[in-house]
Image (cartoon, rainbow, N blue to C red):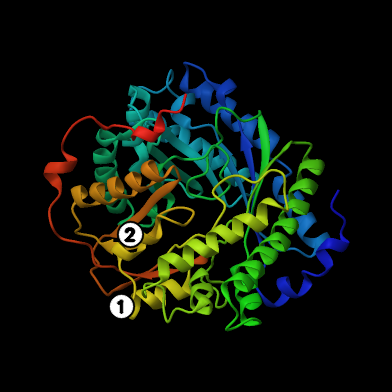
Amino acid sequence: MIHISEVIETNKMIEHENLDVRTITMGINLLDCADSRLDVLCDNIYRKITTLAKDLVKTGDDIAREYGVPIVNKRISITPISLVGGSACQTPEDYVQIAKTLDAAAAKVGINFLGGYSAIVSKGMSRSDELLIRSIPQALATTQFICSSINVGSTKTGINMDAVRLMGEIIKETAEATKDRDSLGCAKLVVLCNAPDDNPFMAGAFHGVSEADAIINVGVSGPGVVKYALEQIREADFETLCETIKKTAFKITRVGQLVAQEASRRLNIPFGIIDLSLAPTPAIGDSVADILKEIGLEHPGAPGTTAALALLNDQVKKGGVMASSYVGGLSGAFIPVSEDQGMIDAVECGALSIEKLEAMTCVCSVGLDMIAIPGDTAASTISGIIADEAAIGMINQKTTAVRIIPVVGKGVGEIVEFGGLLGYAPIMQVNGFDCSRFVSRKGRIPAPIHSFKN
């Protein structure tokens, strides 16, 4: 049992160092909502979400007030909708109707985001999967709270290049469908490899089929806390540096554990996992990039960046796993460009390119995240970027992702504003050489040899 006395020492972290619980995410199984009649399916979905999650926001607010711990978002993840809507949906427009139902349910319970407008197609696409994927541009253009994710590969199955090619086209279509909002729809769409079933962070959250009927997952954050701790030991050796990060991650995770247990008890829903990722925000001082600078880099992107990020990610995990018996999700360090002021600064001064970010994703939690690129970037180029990132995940047995935003009407060096936690981003240069012959090949890239462990 965690006692409140364990949290008292974090008061300064909360007040001055941007410590927060980034999200309480309720996972909900919608498989029992399936029906061959679309209207009945939508009614079932709306009823189940609004019943199970009716007290989620109030509970989060009550815990935040009573314990003095900011809880930034309350979210819901659901069973991948392609598994739920298959018998009822005959067209992409049918899936859009489900998306609107989900959006209405999210509005009713007052959450910030709902994830799980998703399909798992790492080995092949069913008809239902393809219909959902083709519905994504319209679904994200006509809803407010919905997030979509597509898993196109895994270490066990390889990479479904037919899905990779299609997702390049869908990202372009989503950008066009939301061009009046600087292609914001793409900020709520992520393409994954090795997607975890219990991730509480958007846009990649969905409720895996191996999960209970409902579950509470919590995502903590606190890059500002780690940065402050490192400021106290400047010029220390690597052993001291690692020990400091590890101890700080332990304290951050214990706060998340307290919140998760309280939310689980009050909602009478089982506790799932703590995701102990360092998730930055656009706020000054709440930056993973600033941690890398404190470790000794002039800017992220300088030589040594990948090594420094590997060190940080590993120590965060080592400290976190000692603080909770149930660590899951992604867990590590996020490096989104638009959501991290230090990353934005690194791009603007020329220190950080997409190619260097790709190298960094070999050792961090996710992948190429919240990167704005020119709106005239070819769909095949986007597919090539997705394939590269999926290959890193597949070979390294880790989750990787691409959340890339081709901003219609804007070019390299211009700025795009997304607002809120999504922040703003400079449009980054993309390698202009053609890869269309590669991504147009049909079929799958086979799983690597080390995948065969049965």
Q: Is residue 22 visible?
A: no
Q: Residue at x 44, y 78 (%)?
A: 297
Please tell me whether residue 255 is drawn above or below residue 214 in the rendered image.
Answer: below
- Viewer-side residue, 370 vs 367: 367
Specify whether 154 is left or right of 218. left
Amino acid type, label 2:
Asp
Look at mark 1 in the image and give the residue it sits on.
Answer: 350
Specify whether 84 is left or right of 211. left
Specify whether 361 is left or right of 62. left
Foreground mark, 1 or 2? 1
Q: Quadrant of residue 268?
A: top right
Q: Secondary structure at mark 1?
A: loop
Q: Which mark is residue 141?
A: none
Q: Residue at x 37, y 32 (%)?
A: 132
**Residue 326 placed where, x, y %?**
69, 43
Q: Residues within 10 Å of mark 2 (few under 14, many from 20)?
A: few
Q: Quadrant of residue 157?
A: top left
User: Nearer the N terminus, badge 1 or badge 2?
Assistant: 2
**Residue 296 placed where, x, y %?**
49, 79
Q: Secondary structure at mark 2?
A: helix
Amino acid type, label 1:
Gly
Please tell me whether residue 85 is drawn above or below residue 421 in the rendered image.
Answer: above
Q: Residues within 10 Å of mark 1 (few under 14, many from 20)?
A: few
Q: Residue at x 37, y 75 (%)?
A: 302
Rounded to the nearest angstrom, the CA distance separating label 1 from label 2 is 29 Å
**Residue 150 placed where, x, y %?**
40, 39
Look at mark 2 in the image and give the residue it sits on.
Answer: 180
Q: Quadrant of residue 273?
A: top right
